Structure formats: structure tokens, C-alpha cells
Image (spheres, rainbow, N blue to C red):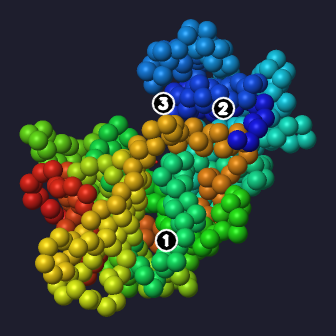
Amino acid sequence: MKKIDNQLLVIFGASGDLTVRKLIPALFNLYKEGHLPENFAVLGTSRSNMTDEEFRAKVVTESKFLKDSISDEAIDFIEGFANRMFYEDLGGSYEEPYIGLKNRVESINKEFSLDNNVIYYLSTPPGIYELISKNLKDQGLSEENKGWKRLIVEKPFGYTLETAKALNKGIQTYFNESQIYRIDHYLGKETVQNLLVTRFSNSIFEPLWNRNYINHIEITNAESVGVGSRGGYYDKSGALRDMFQNHLLQIVSLVAMEPPIDANAESIRNEKVKALQSIRHLNEETFYTNTTRGQYLASTINGEKVKGYREEDGVADNSMTETYAAIKFYIDNWRWKDVPFYVRTAKCMPTKVTEVVIHFKPSHHRLFEGTNSDNRLIIRIQPDEGILMKFGVKVPGQGFKVETANLDFHYTDLVDTYVMEAYERLLLDAMQGDATLYARADEVEAAWAFVDPILEEWKSNREKMHGYPAGTWGPKFADKLIDGQDGWRNPGPNLTDSADYCEL
Ligand code: BG6
């Protein structure tokens, strides 16, 4: 493992949910596993008034998200971690010059000998990313003459192509692109990274990984829950912005990219961006045939009533925001010409699952009458992470009857391996200055360039919004999108018999 420099992590928006729910638990696990550098500290900052002690209690000692991880640890071990946490009140506004913050950064740097290395983590609304970057620069806090400085930004990274470009340009005015780390927590998932290893460290897959052998590619991201308490945010976002533009197109880029020249961040990201730029954009003729949008409706699952999307808190009564999106598209390059990609994401599905299914073409000469081996490679991103290969075997007995068998690998079989949570892995990478698993500006823009026209078209409401009962695999209309390919692979049955499919 690379050596990790001494450093300070400054979290903006530290009084918010992400810090206590994800960031501090991830840091604690890194601390437990001995991954943090010897000299390390965290400075939380936001507009709330809090002392260091109150911050430590909130994010460590009294945090319900750390309860299980700290219960078996000795008190001084926990204190050793908590005492590295500090808090600086920005005084009610992100706009005022960061003089107090600068003094605090300097004093903590000195006290802990942090060598002036700092990561700024922006866990605030994206509308103020540029402002924060400017204020940091104004105080000389982005300068790298003494120690390095890095900036991690959370999604959403833009709302449209135009706003994403403006945001990139805005932040790049104050930080260099090499200092900027755009987080996409899907890239922190072990199984997403394994897409690269499966493809490029084995000799058996890559020769088949192209239009000659692959019939189509299907990617499903299903969540069993609805929008819960996030209705206010979600209603302005929708499935396409919330999941497809970032997480799912990141997966697509890893499935579709060409082999990189080496395993460096820039080499890998160069290939990913090329794949994204090669996606054929939809147009007047293909919007209707290649996209389906839907919204979940109230239903009853196992005797319990489940709310419909429009009944959720923060959601407009006549909302036309999609909670289901399915898109068919092509990648216009040498490798993928004419191979359709089918990608769908949705809330309130029968189960939580994310998987990539590579459907191979049937064998070109059918030797055994009446059979057709169903060759599929299923890469299960979550849960039950692993890989499943489906292939034909002979049914024992007379003649040549073929049946599909499974060859599978589950990550849980690697009993001795500790699998890091996405945020652990990503924080550790940023601490080491490795941006491979972070999205580059041009990647984000290429993804928006594909999504933008679809959003525009959907905004016009020319395309129907299909209601689907919560607990089902989405609008029936989406079946048309995948016509001729034996339908979607739905891992599990619908959870409700409700047949209230409708157009909204
Ligand atoms: C987030 C989305 O980025 O990803 C959420 O904003 C979604 O709406 C979540 O629920 C899904 O993440 P995971 O890791 O649970 O699949």
C-alpha cells in the first residue's frame, strides 16, 4: 500500500447527515484497520454553532451510526479517534471571508504536524461549491507551495449539461483539475472496480467482449424503498439525474471502455470518457422508442399499504418526476456498433439489486436440435456481490438434451478478506492522491451531454409517465423497449398483484 502523508480533512457541511452517517464511520474503520497516517485530524465546519466537544459527541461517542463499531473497542482507543475531531463555526454564513477557518487550519496543522496537507470535503448544496472554492483561494488555502491541497465534491454535479459545465469552470477558477475529486460512491464499490479486473486481467472474457459475440447488455439498478424523507430533493431530481447520469453511466463506461494503456488514473479515465462520448444521443425519432419513464403508485405489499410517490412528503400532488427510467442506447464505435444497451433504474421495485448482464449471442451453428444455450455473464454489483456464468450442459441420459447450468462466485467466499465500504475506499484513495475512482470533468460533461436531451424531451411531457404499483418491476410499457430480446431479467417476482398500471 502507498504511504499516506500526514494530513487534515476539513469537512464543509459537517453538521449534516453525510458526515455522521457515512464519512466519520468510514474514517473510524480506516483508523481501526490502521490505514490513517500517524498525524491526522478532522476539522468539521458549517453554519451551526458547536464546540469541539459537541461535535465529537455528535459524530463519534453518541453517534448511532458508530454504536456497533465502537462497542467492542477500548475507551482510550475511541478517545484517541474522537480527540482528533475539531469544529469551527463559520458564523452563520458561507460567504464571509474564512479568516477564522484559516487560523484554525493553521493551528491544527501546527499542533499535529500535518505538513500543510489538506483535503477539503464539500458536503454542502452544490450551489455553494464555487463560493467555498473562491473563499478558500482568497485565504490562500488552496495554494500548494507548502503541502498539497485537494477538494472533494459530492453529487449532484450539475443539474444539466450547462450547469455542470458552469460548475466545472467555476471550481477550476480556484483549484486545478488535478486537485478536484468528484465523488461517485458507486466507483467505491468493490464489485464496480472488479469490472475492470474481470475484463482486463483474464484472457477468457476480453476476446468475446465485443459486437461479434455479445448480443446485448442489460444493466438493472433496483431499489425496494421509495424516496422516504428525501421527497423534497428527489422531486427536483428524478431517477435520470439521481442515478442514471452518474452511477449507471459510470458502470456503462467501465463495461464499454477500451483497455487502458496502464492502470493509472488518467489512462483509465481517458478510456472511460471515450466510451461515454461514443454513446449515440437520442433524437426525435428515438426518444419515444428508446426511453420509458414511470412513477410508483400506492399498493399493498404483504398486507401493508405502501405510499405512492405523489403522497410522499415534499412531493408535489401533480408531480411529473420519474422514479423509474429505462433507456436503450447504442455506442457508436468499432467494438459496440449495433449492440443495444438497456439500462434501467427505479425506486419501489420488488427487491434491491444492481447487476450487469452480458447476453452472448447464441452459438452460430445449432448442433443439438431444439436447444439453445443461454450464455450469460451476470455481474452482481449488490447485494450478494459476485459473478454468475450461465452455460449449457448435457442433461444425463439418452440423446443430447441441453440445460442451463450456473457457475458462480460470491465475494462472501473470500472469508478472510475485509471488503471496504465505498466511502472508506474513496476517502483512502483521495488521501493517497489517487483519482482513478473519481469522475473527471470531461466524464461528467460527456454523461450530461447524453442525458440532457432526454430530460428536455421528458420535460415537454410529450412522452407518457407510466404509473406502476410499488413492489412491481415497473411499467409494462418498458417491455416494448427490450422487444425481441426475451425481456428484462427480473431477479425475483412482483411483490403485489395490484394491476393498477396506468398513464399519469
Ligand atoms: C444515491 C441516490 O446517490 O444512491 C439515492 O441519491 C440512492 O437516491 C442511492 O438511493 C443508492 O445507493 P446504493 O449504494 O444504496 O445503491
Q: Is residue 227 above or below residue 82?
A: below
Across the whole image, how many numbered discs are drawn on residues? Answer: 3
Three-letter code, disc 1: Phe
The label on residue 205 is 1
Q: Is residue 36 above or below residue 86?
A: below
Q: Residues within 10 Å of mark 3 (few under 14, many from 20)?
A: some
Answer yes or no: is residue 127 visible. Answer: no
Q: Residues within 10 Å of mark 1 (few under 14, many from 20)?
A: few
Which residue in the rendered view is the most extreme toward the front? 398
Three-letter code, disc 2: His
Question: Alpha carbon of mark 3 to alpha carbon of mark 1: how far?
Answer: 38 Å
Q: Which residue is mark 2?
A: 35
Residue 477 in the image, given as x and y percentages of width and height = 22, 71
Question: Alpha carbon of mark 2 to alpha carbon of mark 1: how far?
Answer: 34 Å
The label on residue 21 is 3
Three-letter code, disc 3: Arg
Along the viewing direction, whichever of 32 and 164 lies nearer the viewer: 32
Q: Circle 1 sits in a helix, a strand or a loop, which is it?
A: loop
Q: Is residue 382 above or below residue 96?
A: below
Q: Circle 3 sits in a helix, a strand or a loop, which is it?
A: helix
Question: Alpha carbon of mark 2 to alpha carbon of mark 3: how far?
Answer: 20 Å
Is residue 137 shown left or right of residue 435?
right
**In the figure, residue 253 lies in which quadrant?**
bottom right
Residue drawn at (19%, 80%), measured in percent from left and top?
Answer: 400
Q: Residues within 10 Å of mark 2 (few under 14, many from 20)?
A: some
